[in-house]
Amino acid sequence: MTPELTLLDLDRTRTFLLLHGGGGVPTMTGFAHLLAEHAHARVLLPTHPGFGGTPKPADLVGVAGLARTYVDLLDRLDLTNVTVLGNSFGGWVAAEIALLGSPRVSGAVIANGIGVEVDGHPVTDVRGLSPAELRKLSWHDPSKAPQPGQTSQPATAGPGPDVQALLGYTGPAMADPTLAERLGATPVPAHVMWGESDGIVSPEYGKAFAAAFPQATFTLLPRTGHLPQVESPEALLDAVLSVR
């Protein structure tokens, strides 16, 4: 069954598919508008089914299944030369989309993604941490973070419905031990971008993520944490637009 998708579609010329993390679509909306305006691009920002109160078919399970849903969307829209950009959990989905080898996808941008297992650099277990502790891990400058309940919480912040939707795709480990090896077969180039102050997934984790791709560039974003599209959107925009 093809899921019903909630989709923001900002139509310009070049096409980007933006994929949000566990914090929900609000963590990507501002950057979507910035990208559409400055790149004169068509920007698609779907809400992952199950997030934000949207429906999710019972047979839509796993990150690979969500990736296939978005490739089907590109087919229905008859799009080509699409750059897929995902943050956090969305970065994992972007990697799975790139692996599918759709001729409609020309490249992937992973911004502080999760999903791979990296020896010595685990994803931080944030369960049980206070909002202040989560902000400290997620932001270079926690004083600039919106207050709890707004848009800046990382993928695992609290037991809310979006976190339950996230775990429905990822499972409690929020990683796939096969992903790093499978990424070696990715047919399109990847650009991995990482906030230097990310306390959820470290830059060393990001470098290992990039190294798993056969064609990848790694860019470290200064003065930025786990959500560069929120904390340093202009820096992320410049890095994205440098990708050809």
Image (tube, helix red, strand yellow):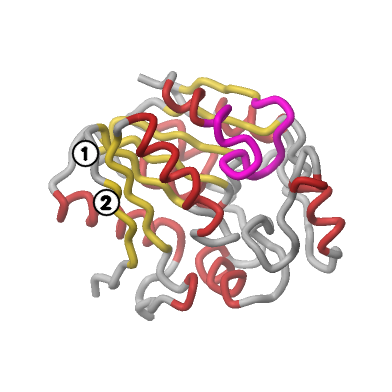
Question: What residue is at 84 percent from the left and 68 percent from the top?
Answer: 128
Q: Quadrant of the N terminus?
A: bottom left
Q: Which circle marks residue 179 in the picture?
A: none
Q: Image quarter for residue 236?
A: top right
Q: Is residue 95 visible?
A: no
Q: Amino acid at mark 2?
A: Val
Question: What residue is at 48 percent from the left and 23 percent from the top?
Answer: 216
Q: Amino acid at mark 1?
A: Arg
Question: What residue is at 24 percent from the left and 38 percent from the top?
Answer: 12
Q: Which circle marks residue 104 in the picture?
A: 1
Q: Image quarter for residue 167?
A: bottom right
Q: Are marks 1 and 2 in contact (CB under 8 Å)?
A: yes
| SS at circle 1 | loop
Residue 70: image location, x then y, percent: 31, 55
Q: Which circle marks residue 71 in the picture?
A: 2
Q: Is residue 197 left or right of residue 206?
A: right
Nearer-N-terminus badge (1/2): 2
